[in-house]
Amino acid sequence: MKNDELKDLLDSIRLTVKDDCLAGQTITTYQLPKEAKTEKVLDVLPEHFENYKKVEIDEKGNLVLTHPDKED
């Protein structure tokens, strides 16, 4: 996966998270494309979501983000 493809993936994930937040969800499950399911990409993804309570890749290869608590 090239840098511009990774950037597009991160942008897509952030949009999904935003939509989930607006819908009142506290966990986002994002189905990663086949191209992103490489060790190199999977290792770097958590670095881009450090402010989340939990970042994991489930057994199906989905990125699961537990949102941080909302600040009032």
Image: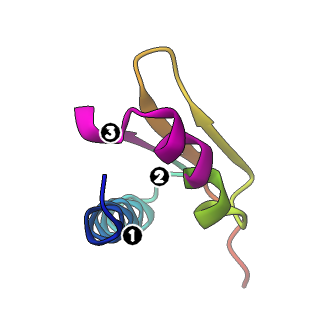
Marks 3 & 1, CB-CB < 8 Å contact = no
- Where residue 27 appears, as percent x and y from the top left, is 53, 45
Q: Residues within 10 Å of mark 1 (few under 14, many from 20)?
A: some
Q: Quadrant of residue 18?
A: bottom left
**Marks 3/1: CA–CA distance:** 17 Å
The residue shown at (32%, 65%) is 19
Q: Between label 1 and label 2, give the one nearer the viewer.
A: 1
Helix, strand or loop at mark 3: loop
**Marks 1/2: CA–CA distance:** 10 Å
The answer to if 63 sits in the magenta stretch is no
Q: Which mark is residue 25?
A: 2
Between disc 3 and disc 2, whose residue precedes? 2
Q: Which mark is residue 32?
A: 3
Q: Between label 3 and label 1, give the one nearer the viewer.
A: 3
The residue shown at (68%, 72%) is 70
Q: Which mark is residue 18?
A: 1
Q: Is residue 41 left or right of residue 8?
A: right
